[in-house]
Amino acid sequence: MGRGLSGVIYPSVRVNGEGFNVAISPGVVDKKLKIVAAAECSMYKLFENTIVDNDFNIENIIDENSFSYYPVNPLYHAGQAECLRRLGVSHITDLI
């Protein structure tokens, strides 16, 4: 990172700029940041088409061994079958 920068946020190439990546200077993590929530997602890609689906949320993070992990509200989670349907395939192995 450049001098004085704590990190940068930039568009994700893997999902055609529809998501973001964050790069953080190592020294900043211990001094300035605390993880309070996270998410687990599945990414389905077929050629230039990509779908990212939220699967689980992680909250109430006290440390790496103590947190709450729960499925995403169905309103915000399409599910594997729907993601595959949107890509026009019937089985996950069709993406390989």
Image (cartoon, grey):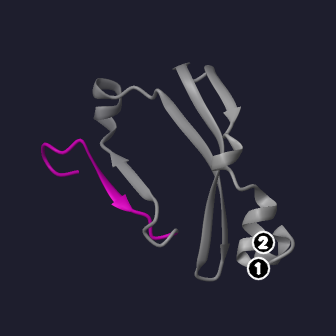
- For the point 71% across and 73% down, the residue is 86
- For the point 18% across and 45% down, the residue is 5
Residue 43 percent coordinates (x, y)? 64, 61
**Residue 13, image quadrant:** bottom left
Can you tell which mark lies on residue 64?
A: none
What separation in Å lies between label 2 and label 1 (alpha carbons)?
5 Å
Of 81 and 28, the residue lying toward us: 81
Q: Residues within 10 Å of mark 1 (few under 14, many from 20)?
A: few
Q: Residues within 10 Å of mark 2 (few under 14, many from 20)?
A: few
Asked if 10 appears above or below 33 in the picture, the reply is: below
Residue 9 located within the stretch drawn in magenta: yes
Asked if 46 appears above or below 64 in the picture, the reply is: below
- For the point 61% across and 78% down, the residue is 49
Residues under numbered marks 2 and 1 in contact, where contact means CB atoms less than 8 Å apart: yes
Secondary structure at numbered mark 1: loop
Asked if 19 appears above or below 58 in the picture, the reply is: below
**Residue 35, image quadrant:** top left
Residue 9 percent coordinates (x, y)? 32, 53
Q: Would you say residue 96 is visible in this rendering?
A: no
Q: Which residue is mark 1?
A: 88
Highlighted magenta segment, given as a residue range: 1-14
Of 2 and 71, the residue lying toward us: 71
Q: Is residue 58 left or right of residue 70?
A: left
Q: Say what amino acid the circle numbered 1 marks.
A: Gly
Q: Is residue 50 left or right of residue 28?
A: right
Residue 75 percent coordinates (x, y)? 66, 47
Q: Which residue is mark 2?
A: 85
Magenta stretch: helix, strand or loop mostly: loop
Q: Say what amino acid the circle numbered 2 marks.
A: Arg
Q: Would you say residue 34 is visible in this rendering?
A: yes
Quick one: which residue is furthest to the bottom in this view? 47
Residue 39 located within the stretch drawn in magenta: no
